[in-house]
Structures are given as C-alpha cells and as structure tokens.
Image (cartoon, rainbow, N blue to C red):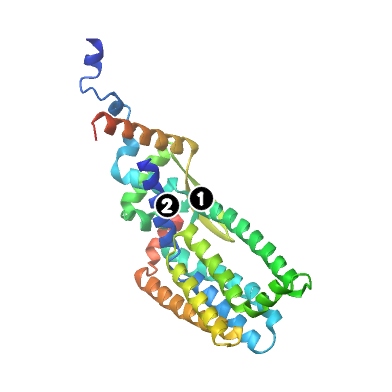
Amino acid sequence: MPKKRDDPSGLGSLEKIDRLIHEPARLNIVAHLSVVECADFLFLLRQTGLTRGNLSSHLSRLEEAGYVVVEKKFVEKIPRTLLRLTNQGRESFRSYRRRMKKVLEELGG
Amino acid sequence: MKESLDLNKLERKAFVSYHQDGLVDLFLGALLLSWGLTMETMLGGMGGVWFVVFFPILLLARRRITYPRLGYARFTRDRRNRRSLAALFTATALLGLLVAFLWSSQSFPGLRDWLHRSIEIFFGGLIAAVLLFKAGISGIRRLYLYAAVILISFAAAQWHTVPIQYSFIVSGAVILVSGAVVLARFLRRYPVRQEETAHAEEKG
C-alpha cells in the first residue's frame, strides 16, 4: 500500500518534526526565549547552562534559520545586544510542541 | 496541557532566579525602616518621600549588580504582573480613601471607633496583603515570610499598645537583614566574570 511505503513507521508526525528545534541545546535556548520578550547572551548562558561556544554556535544556527533576531538597543541608557524569538520562531516552536505531543500520543506514551 | 505547564514552570524558574538578588528585600526593608524612623521623629507625613528616594537606587543597583551577573531579560510575566499590580494599587487606593473617609466621618461612629482602635492591624494587614499578592504572582516565596513578619509585628504593637512606628522599624530591620543575606549569597553564587560580560556585549 502506497501509504505504508511513505510512512513505514506509522509515525507520520515524526517526519514533520523540526530538527533545528529538536536538538536538545537549541530546544533549551528556544524554550527559554519563548518565555521572555527578549534577553541578552549572558542571561541565556546562565539559564541554559550551556558553554559560551556552544550557545554562540546554536544561536547562529537559529539566527540563520530566522528563528532568532539580534537587536542592538539602549536599555536604561545602556547599549545592549538583545536576542528575541521572531514570529516565525515562536510559530515553529508552537508547532514543534504540537507535533511532539502528537508523536508521543501515537507512541502511546 | 502538560507542555504549557512546563513552560510556565520554566518561566517561573527564570523569573525567580532573576529576583534572587535580594534588592527588592533591601528596598522594602529600607522603606519600612525609614518610614518608622521618620514617624518616630514626628515627620510621619514625609514617609512617602522615601519611596522616591529609594526607588531610583533600586534601579541603579539592579543595573550595577544583577545585570552584570545574570544578564538582562524582559519577562512577559513582568507585563502581566504590572497589570495585576496596577489593579491592586487601584483597589488599595480606593480602600485608603474609604478608610480616610470613615476615619474622619461622623456618620458611622461604630466603624470609626473600631478603626481608631485597630489601625495597627489594619496597616499591617494592608502591607501584608500587598506582599502576599506579589508573592503569589511572582513566585518569590520569601515574600510570604515578610508578610508574616509584618502582620505579627503590627499585631504585637496593637496588643501591647506599642506605637505603630516600632512595627515599621522592627519589620523593616528584619527584612533589611534578610535582604542583605540574600544579596551576599547572590554575590557569592554569581561572581562577575569579565570575559562573560564582554562576550555578552560583543555577541549578544
């Protein structure tokens, strides 16, 4: 049956999982950014527990994908470089959560 | 939904860790202590001035102490909290107006006499209620303890007919000391690492 060939595992939702977000370190970053309006690098470093190099490289990946945007702003008269989830990033994270939930349901978990 | 609960937990954890610097405690303690001392020197009406004095210091301290150690974040929770606090302050202001009216009015002698007799409890209850509310929405648990300290010190003043300013002084001093301990712990736990701050600024 063609459907079986296309989806041999029977877990169709798994194929649609966003692999960029699914990586644990990036999921950690995106989850933290999703609960704030914006944050700087040091905040994410403290909250995620990642190393500087790791955080930096994962942020670059997320920025390239258009999930995270870097903004330079004056906050309380001090220039700060702030990271923010874009609308696309928020939407991708929402659908990632939806799909993961579906996958886990399909697995009977 | 489980995942939304988990995100709430994550948000709360980040928010609470961000407020483990003890600065709000120091602000509250200094405010109550100064207010009590000002009342003791018969300048009770000057109490509100301390808020204007201490609030910019709180903001400056946060900029100098918290941000270099924990980084900067703007929480969506802050926005929700501000809305709730605005509602609370409006309710408190209306209650204050009602009390002022009852205090001076001749229309309700029974209520007025009760208010004159129980002013310490009323004040303590009001401040404790604000702290309980703030503790509930922010998740900062030590605020519950401060609410209890305030309520007990004001109730004790009522029962032992001690002037109300001593309740302000005692509860302010307790909260100030607690804030100093929390701050010291925070400074030890999160030392400033120049390279991290520099990198944060450079990379974002």
Q: CA distance from mark 1 to mark 2?
A: 9 Å
The residue positioned 39% from the left and 54% from the top of the image is A44
Name which residue type carries label 2. Glu
Residue A31 occupies quadrant = top left
Please give the chain letter of the residue carrying mark 1: B
Looking at the image, is A54 positioned above or below residue B95? Answer: above
> Which chain is indicated by disc 2?
B
Q: Residue at x 51, y 56 (%)?
A: A80
Asked if residue B38 can be seen in this view, the reply is yes
- Against A15, residue B28 (above or below) is below
- For this view, does B109 lie left or right of residue A46? right
- Which amino acid, by three-letter code, is at mark 1? Thr
**Quarter of the image that includes the C terminus of chain A:** top left
- Left or right of B171 on screen, residue A108: left
Which residue was labeled with disc 1?
A: B76
| Quadrant hosting residue B37 | bottom right
Q: Earlier in the sequence, mark 1 or mark 2?
A: 2
Question: Which residue is nearer to you in this view: B165 or A17?
Answer: B165
Q: Position of residue A10 (x, y in %)?
A: 23, 22
Residue B72 makes an appearance in the image: no
Give yes or no for contact between labels 1 and 2 (Cβ–Cβ under 8 Å): yes
Q: Nearer the viewer, residue B126 or B28?
A: B126
In the picture as drawn, the residue positioned furthest to the top comes out as A1
Q: Nearer the viewer, residue B161 or B134?
A: B161
Question: Where's the N terminus of chain A, which quadrant?
Answer: top left
Q: Residue A40 at x, y = what percent?
A: 45, 54
- Label 1's element? helix
- Considering the numbered disc 2 on the image, is that residue within a helix, a strand or a loop? helix
Coordinates of residue B17 in the picture (x, y in percent): 40, 62
Where is residue A82 shown, x and y percent of the image? Answer: 49, 51
* Residue bearing the label numbered 2: B11
